[in-house]
Amino acid sequence: MRFRDQLHHEVPRTTVYTWHKHFRNGRRSSEVLEIQQPPLTTDQLDGFQIKIIKEVATMFCDRRPETDDLSLILRAVIETGQLMPSKLARYISCVQNVTDRTASRYIENFACTDSSYAAAQQFYGRSVLQFLAPRERQFLMAVDWTDFDSCNQTTLVAALILNNRQALPVCFKTVSKNLPKMITKRDVLTQLSLLITAAGIHRIDQCVIVADREFATEAFLALLRELGLSYIIRFKSNCYVTSTDGKSRSASDWYRSRPSTKQPFADPTGDYPINTTLVVQNARWTKKLLIAVDQIIVHKEEGMKDIWSLICSNPNWTADDVLFGYSRRWGIEYHFRNTKSVRYGRDFEQHRVNSNLQRDRMWLIANIASIATISLGKARNDLAQPSFRKRETYSVFRKGLDTGMFLHSFPPVQRQLILETWSRTLQDLRSHFSGAPMT
């Protein structure tokens, strides 16, 4: 009998873990949690972990042969913390007892054709909307580019903003940097609208597109109106805004000359104070084109480098709602860091490929692995000792990343408790990681 199996036999059947949760009022309440099953052996724990990962693959992939390959790839991604195909193949070869070349075929054969990849991505996008998007409220969808300079590639990602400030891509497309970007924007947003319609749960106007200054163009706004999508888009502060009374100024000049505080603009009477918001209803945007927009909001707070000049499509939204919606856009930047960074994430930026399809296939694997990693981090958070810091040092993704890589080194009962909590978290994803509502 191995030493780790001896430890399992030494643990009594009624092993109980007790810890404290720290509340803001300074009090502590003790909670007692215990494992739901008798203590498992190491082999049983390994099987339990494989079963959980296979459940994740089944949730976001509907084809049986591809599900088996995907579960094996996800296991390699979670336990190695990498997205490099060579490192994943090395792990699979050790687990399956095959050669490296045979192991690499597991990755190469997953959604290897255009038709199989399109079907896999559509099922994944519908599943994300069904499991995570709020049913009866508007939800935020951030749109942004991320570049891979070593391969001359760029990927446009439309990601659902979650309630824990993380983001989860719904649809994405990789193209060469030499192609016109407007074609890719139309393809991705059209695919997004089709996914929302195919899911059959949400209306098109429930999706609120949140984008940065690069997307503030006449063609992009026309595309959003054509598809029926709501939007909050930031534009450059030197763009001109024309009010209903014919006054035309740049957004920065409006900010310096308006004294109102979160009210529709009035006559200028002095300098515009800090920590205030200017609302311009039924304005026209840019000096030459005079594009009609429903509402323009200009805002600045203490410590901000530049003002926020925002265009929104709904005149009934309050300034606080619009500012809250745009502030959540940063979740997509967190996702890019978690996926691409060698220090904080899975080192996807160093993966060099010449095929856009292969890049998208690895994006799909990375996104499904992110769901498993975030849910594992949430399970680890629920079982962690209380933190007396006002702000968490590590994100939920980082905790899940580290836990997945070193889960085999945990004590057996603690590992079993983490796996049981992880399984319960995945069974009710919506209650833990629902999309961030508009308000």
Image (cartoon, rainbow, N blue to C red):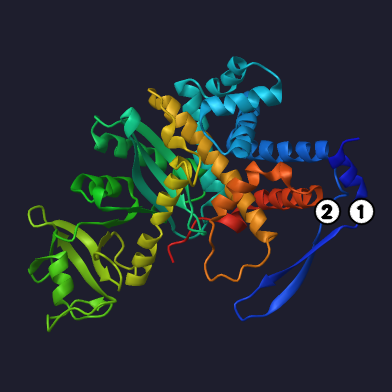
The residue that label 2 is drawn on is 36
The residue carrying pointer 2 sits among few (fewer than 14), some (14 to 19) or many (20 or more) residues within 10 Å by Cα, namely few
Tell whether label 2 touches label 1 (CB within 8 Å).
Answer: no
Tell me what residue is drawn at x 53 percent, y 56 percent: 395
Q: Secondary structure at mark 1?
A: loop
Is 347 in front, or is 361? 347
Q: Is residue 248 above or below residue 42?
A: below
For the residue marked with disc 1, what is the amino acid? Answer: Arg
- The one nearer the camera, 186 or 379, is 379
The C terminus sits in image quarter: bottom left
In the picture, residue 101 is in which quadrant? top right
Amino acid at dot 2: Gln
Point out the tag, 1 or 2, that comes first from the N-terminus: 1
- For residue 243, say whether it is visible: no
Q: Which mark is residue 303?
A: none
Q: Residues within 10 Å of mark 1 (few under 14, many from 20)?
A: few
At 64% across and 35% down in the image, what residue appears?
75
Judge by depth and name the residue closer to the eye, 375 or 200. 375
Residue 391 pos. (x, y %): 52, 67
Q: Position of residue 304 (x, y in %)?
A: 29, 67
Q: Which residue is found at the position 19% from the left and 57% from the top?
A: 236
Q: Is residue 331 above or below residue 197?
A: below
Res. 12 image quadrant: bottom right
Residue 189 visible in the picture: yes
Image position, residue 217 (x, y; %): 20, 48
In the figure, 26 relative to 171: above or below? below
Q: Which mark is residue 13?
A: 1
Q: Residue 90 vs residue 162: left or right?
A: right
Asked if residue 426 lies left or right of residue 363, the reply is right
Say what secondary structure mark 2 lies in: loop
